[in-house]
Amino acid sequence: MQLNKPYLLFLGASQSMTDCKTAAGLRDWCRDDVMGQMGLPGCAVDLRLPWYRPAEAVAAGARSFVIGVAPVGGAIPMEWRPALLAAVAAGLDIVSGMHTRLASVPGLAEEAQRRGCRLLDVRHSDRTFAVASGVRRPGRRVLTVGTDCALGKKYTALALTSALRARGIAATFRATGQTGIMIAGAGVAIDAVVADFVAGAAESLSPANEPAHWDVIEGQGALFHPAYAGVTLGLVHGSQPDALVLCHDPSRRCLDGFPEHPIPSLESAMSQYLTAAKVTNPTARFVGISLNTSSLDAESRRKLMASLTEDFGLPVVDPIRDGAGAIAEVMAAQFGPDNAP
Amino acid sequence: MQLNKPYLLFLGASQSMTDCKTAAGLRDWCRDDVMGQMGLPGCAVDLRLPWYRPAEAVAAGARSFVIGVAPVGGAIPMEWRPALLAAVAAGLDIVSGMHTRLASVPGLAEEAQRRGCRLLDVRHSDRTFAVASGVRRPGRRVLTVGTDCALGKKYTALALTSALRARGIAATFRATGQTGIMIAGAGVAIDAVVADFVAGAAESLSPANEPAHWDVIEGQGALFHPAYAGVTLGLVHGSQPDALVLCHDPSRRCLDGFPEHPIPSLESAMSQYLTAAKVTNPTARFVGISLNTSSLDAESRRKLMASLTEDFGLPVVDPIRDGAGAIAEVMAAQFGPDNAP
């Protein structure tokens, strides 16, 4: 799935920044690809981007109208219909991460066909993939994995991509979820793939590359998650990661939304991820720990990071505060030119 | 997916029993649900069932026309079209485990609609499932798991269901693959479910039941399989098995079709399955080992089974030779009325 940039970000009639997490993420992670924002009457959010209507945005070069707001329930409100029709009439592709498909909006598919625009439901997967081969391919791969869902795997992968590039190391962010796909302009919504083909889809997401090139793959779910672990395992196997980064939120005791499922120790999590990763890459290893420390005061944060650094002998970062440079340094040292495969 | 029985088994113009594995499995495992067989001119296979044409089969009570042959490539040959149309014209549902959908046969969907018959592609999943809850539900569950694909997980589950019932223990076979679904007349093609919902689909496959009732769930894939492990893990988590049976073929050194992936030791396999199963059922345990000993002579077979029995302290059976009674006995003892949950 390849998206056309630049984007016009649609905020609907949002009342809170929380609802506009997707739009804010796009602004923060691919600012150069974002032309502006558009709201409906009553919208209380302002991302401090230029305001555009669809026709003006097209005149200024925009290619896609991106739904940057997630209303509760995941359905497309009927109040959006005129804006969606106007966007397509102006010649913009529509990009949506909603559960409801864009084609379910009355008249939108017909208008898109008439105008030659695409309706892109990035949460869905309409491609077919091959069954995974398990065969190794050139290029290096690092995968962010987690002790739970929604604790920074995408953010860590993006920060690590930046940190590698800042050190002159070729790196490509590989998106596996809808916001990541919008940021990268490409990717595979891995949890929407038919189960038999998840590892195959992951193989296709990070194809053969230059030996020293890094694919930095956005992780999904958790290996011990009662609902999503199958997605995680297929992604681990198909990614064939040389390196893994464990993402963790020390404030969580249980999996989010699953109060009967405690989060395992970091040792146990790492051990399970390594067992899984070694199925397709026997030299897989952890190269860092990425913490979400937003719940900690400065002293608790310092203590925790020092203790984890000592326990695991790995760099420990909070990517929002520190970036991921310390992890990139370890990768450069362990996989540098002197350690070419 | 609920299939209508009894079945008329379609053999096409098969030249070998190997191609008719599905039909032979149905004859062996649900003989009472099989009314007869039908071949095309040139068919060299005879399952020793009554021969019927569709209209005659309907007159005798048949409800579904089941494609019991798997041609190389998985596509539906055009030579079958007249027989499929005749079956629908006679009022039979068509049941297919092929990759190609039945609706791709020109005119078949229209004829089915006209006659009020169903075209059932059991390899595909057109249902939607909820995300898994991870919440325990009443009833007992045993899952067959394997050291590879295609080494007896379905056969073991069927044999175990029979063995439990023979001992007066309520048990239901729960099918997760196309042949199993045809045998049971119901089930979920678990590898065809969208990845996010695999564990949820597995939860729905073995719903809450009487506390002493056993669901005997057909396993799929293997936890360390580079292509299919995600399916396996989701199935393990959603099944919440109280008991596991490890299926193994001692003649295999590597995963079938993956020569670079050796089969792990039984200890390692069991340990990985238990780690996975304990995510949703902390008391999960192995209750037996099921061997495919077709490659062994009598002496090697006896030695291997004795040594595994000693090593693991579990009953070891070849279900084709011995049935699964020894495993059912262990289950009855460990989970009997004195051990009610």
Image (cartoon, coloured by chain):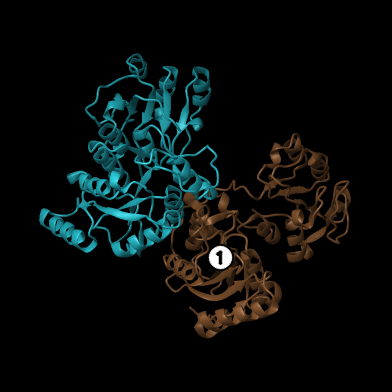
Chain colours: A brown, B cyan
Looking at the image, which residue is at 51% across and 64% down?
A239
Please, which residue is most extreme toward the top here?
B59
Task: Count the labels in the image.
Answer: 1
Instruction: Provide the residue designation for mark 1.
Output: A146
Q: Observer-nearest residue: B168 or B111?
A: B168
Horizontal relation, residue B52 to residue A33: left or right: left
Q: Position of residue A141 (x, y in %)?
A: 54, 70
Please, which residue is most extreme toward the left here?
B299
Horizontal relation, residue B169 to residue A147: left or right: left
Q: Position of residue B134 (x, y in %)?
A: 50, 50
Q: Position of residue A96 (x, y in %)?
A: 71, 49
Please, which residue is most extreme toward the front here?
B338
Q: Position of residue B128 (x, y in %)?
A: 55, 39
Q: Observer-nearest residue: A72 or A326?
A: A72
Q: Secondary structure at mark 1?
A: strand
Can residue A107 be seen by looking at this rendering?
yes
Q: Observer-nearest residue: B116 or A293?
A: A293
Horizontal relation, residue A20 to residue B58: left or right: right
Residue A206 picture quarter: bottom right
Residue B60 picture quarter: top left
Q: Label 1: chain?
A: A
Horizontal relation, residue B219 to residue A311: left or right: left
Looking at the image, which residue is at 20% across and 48% down?
B326
Mark 1 residue type: Gly
Can residue B336 be seen by looking at this rendering?
no
Q: Is residue B208 above or below residue A216?
A: above
Q: Is residue B66 above or below residue A230?
A: above
Mark 1 nearby-residue class (10 Å; few <14, some 14–19, many ≥20): many
